[in-house]
Amino acid sequence: MSRVCELTGKGPMTGNNVSHANNKTKRRFLPNLNDVTLMSDALGRSFKLRVSASALRTVDHRGGLDAFLAKAKDAELSPKALKIKKDIDKAGAPAA
């Protein structure tokens, strides 16, 4: 399972551990991913997604999964999230 957020595309970053003696060793910064179940109001069902904590806060801020996906760029979404977005569009949900 890859360490990539399904809604924002956020993935691991690289950097350095820097010691007191200024020695540098490579390290990875991993996103804070959580397995969550989000409810779609337009489709009336829930979806299990692997989402970063910051994306989860953004979903709440925008008013739910449907509103988040309406504003999200297709390039950032996973194939699973893209399918949900297209299903919501087919259902004729208002883009609020």
Image: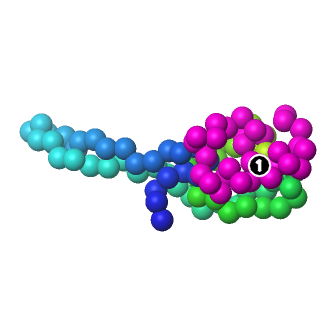
Tell me if residue 27 is in the magenta stretch.
Answer: no
- Would you say residue 89 is visible in this rendering? yes
Nearest the eye: 31 or 47:
47
Nearest the eye: 18 or 92:
92
| Identity of the residue drawn at 64% across and 36% down | 73
Query: Could you say whether the residue bearing mark 1 is in a helix, strand or loop?
Result: helix
Query: Above or below — where is 61 with respect to 27?
Result: above
Q: What amino acid is labelled 1 in the image? A: Lys
Q: Position of residue 10 (x, y in %)?
A: 50, 44
Query: Above or below — where is 59 with respect to 34?
Result: above
Tell me if residue 72 is in the magenta stretch.
Answer: yes
Q: Position of residue 46 (x, y in %)?
A: 78, 61
Region rendered in magenta: 67-96
Query: Above or below — where is 23 with respect to 46?
Result: above
Q: Is 88 placed left or right of 74 in the picture? A: right
Query: Above or below — where is 19 with respect to 47?
Result: above
| Identity of the residue drawn at 26% across and 49% down | 27
| Identity of the residue drawn at 46% across and 60% down | 2
Q: Is 43 placed left or right of 77 in the picture? A: right
Nearest the eye: 58 or 49:
49
**Residue at which label 1 appears:** 86
Q: Position of residue 63 (x, y in %)?
A: 78, 40
